[in-house]
Amino acid sequence: MQGDPAVTVTTVLYNSEESLPRYAAALAAGIERGLVRLIAVDNASPDESAATLKRLLPGAELISSASNLGFAGGCNLAWPEVETRYWMLLNPDVEADAAGLERLVEWMDRHPNVGLASPRLRGPDGEEVPVARAQDSLVRPLVRALRLHRLLPMRWRSRWLLPGEREAAEIVDGWLPGAALIARTEAVTEVGPLDESLFMYGEDREWCWRMARAGWELGVCGEVELAHGHGTSARATWSEPERMRREVAGQLGAARRMHGRLWATGLALLAGAVLLVESLDPRRGESRATRRLRARQYLRCGLSANRNR
């Protein structure tokens, strides 16, 4: 031990057993050196995630939930136990080594106005996963669908935080995914932890929104890059259509919290229509079938919300 830990890492376990060996191998040195305190939450996982983690990382503290509280609810179980300067939400499919965590803490120390930050992430295919995400907009989907953003200078595109098309920036105007999200404890005390009404997906968007409203900045630490396994727990739990349904529902739930029901309904209908049009073009990113499936989820949510008004 080299002193008091600087960061408390919280990992929610649910069907996470497959990814834990790599996760634990990366995190072990940080725990042994006293840099990290690990509080894992067993979210009533049906597999042996909790037992596997304790075997791989005996120094981990474990909180057990009697039921699956979702990502936000699981993370929040650990929040009352956090006594360090920083609280980091870390997915069990992210490999966070001691050197990277140490640089991330140092970066936060140098940016006292940042309430939430993410390192860079790289997926299993070696491609960088954009972490600077745009807030939802009723204009941006149309601009992208018509490819009008290609006419904008890069600095303007960056201002819009178009994923995969922005220049590197430390301070961002948008939101950050919760896969490897470090929070300043002072900021969480001020604005509160995650919104538990958002069971899965969308809680990170809403948290970033509350942080920004309270005057805290959101940052990307370009000095640190972590490997990310792309939602192995979710894919082990749900089929792809069900996972996508939950992702869309979470996004729209966050939009309702931030902008109101009418705005969120408009976003759902607009996004669904744009995705249907884009599915006609085989050159657009995701497969045509995936875009059609995502479009149906948006339109179903939008039409359902409209009927229930």
Image (spheres, rainbow, N blue to C red):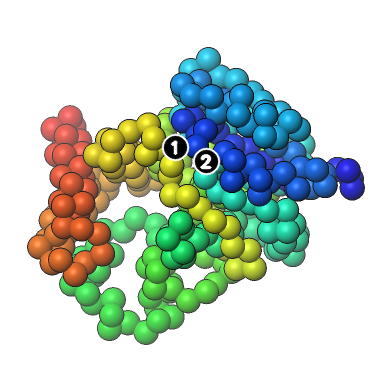
Name the spot of residue 293 as percent of width and height, x first. Answer: 18, 47
Q: In the orientation shown, which residue stands out farthest toward the top?
A: 66
Decide: few, some or many residues near mark 2? Use Cα within 10 Å; few <14, some 14-19, many ≥20: some
For marks 1 and 2, the one nearer the N-term is 2
Left or right for 96, reference 70: right
Structural distance between the alpha carbons of marks 1 and 2:
8 Å
Where's the N terminus, which quadrant?
A: top right
Q: Amino acid at mark 2?
A: Ser
User: On the image, which quarter does residue 32 sit in?
Assistant: top right
Name the spot of residue 24 as percent of width and height, x first. Answer: 64, 42
Name the spot of residue 251 as percent of width and height, x first. Answer: 34, 44
> Which residue has dot 1 on it?
233
Q: Please give the name of the residue rendered at 66% of the width and 45% of the height, measured from the top-left corner.
A: 25
Q: Please give the name of the residue rendered at 28% of the width and 35% of the height, measured from the top-left corner.
A: 239
Q: Amino acid at mark 1?
A: Ser
> Which residue has dot 2 on it?
19
User: On the image, which quarter does residue 136 sit in?
Assistant: bottom left
Where's the C terminus, which quadrant?
A: top left
Q: Is residue 80 visible?
A: no
Q: Is residue 196 above or below residue 117?
A: above
User: On the image, which quarter does residue 170 sit in?
Assistant: bottom right
Q: Is residue 69 above or below residue 133?
A: above
Pointers 1 and 2 in contact (CB under 8 A)? yes
Name the spot of residue 147 as percent of width and height, x first. Answer: 22, 75
Decide: few, some or many residues near mark 1? Use Cα within 10 Å; few <14, some 14-19, many ≥20: many
Q: Is residue 92 visible?
A: yes
Observer-nearest of 222 and 176:
222
Element type where label 1 sits in the image: helix
Observer-nearest of 230 and 194:
230
Left or right for 117, reference 273: right
